[in-house]
Image: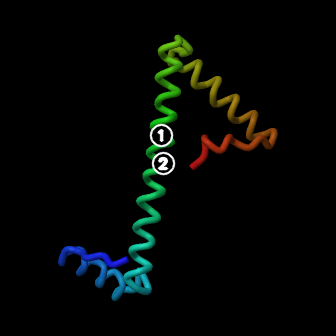
Amino acid sequence: MNINFAPVDESFIKRSVECGLYSNANELVRDAVRRLRESEERHVELLAALQLGEDDIAQGRTKTYSKGLMQAVRERAAGRAASGEKPKSDATP
C-alpha cells in the first residue's frame, strides 16, 4: 500500500519521528489507524448504549433524579466494592 500525504501532514509525521515519538513513519500510521479504529468502536458502543436508554425512556423505565436516588446508588456501589464485587465491563473505561 502506498499513501500520499499533504505536505503539512508529511512534515508532521517527519517531526514526530525525528523527536522520538515514533521510530518510523510506518509506526505512526499504524498507531493512527489503530486509534481511529478504537474510536469508531467506542462510538458504536456509545450509540448502542444511548439506544438502550432511549428504549427505557420510551417504555417508562425511568427514575426521577433526586439526592436520595444518588445516595442509594453510592451506597450500593460502596457495598458492592466492599464485598469485592467487580464492576461490569461496560461500567469501566
In the image, what residue occupies the spot 64% across and 31% down? Answer: 74
Q: Which residue is mark 2?
A: 42
Q: Which residue is mark 1?
A: 46
Q: Position of residue 19 (x, y in %)?
A: 35, 86
In the image, what residue occupies the spot 61% across and 25% down? Answer: 71
Q: Determine crowd level at label 1: few under 14, some 14-19, many 20+ residues with C-alpha closer than 10 A.
A: few
Quarter containing the N terminus: bottom left
Tag 2 and tag 1, C-beta contact below 8 Å: yes
Query: Does residue 83 sit above or below 63 in this rendering?
Result: below
Q: CA distance from mark 2 to mark 1?
A: 6 Å
Residue 76 lies left or right of residue 43; in this view the side is right
Amino acid type at circle 1 is Leu
Q: Position of residue 63 (x, y in %)?
A: 55, 15
Q: Position of residue 10 (x, y in %)?
A: 25, 79
Of all residues, the one furthest to the right in this rendering is 83
| SS label for mark 1 | helix
Query: Does residue 68 sit above or below 14 in this rendering?
Result: above
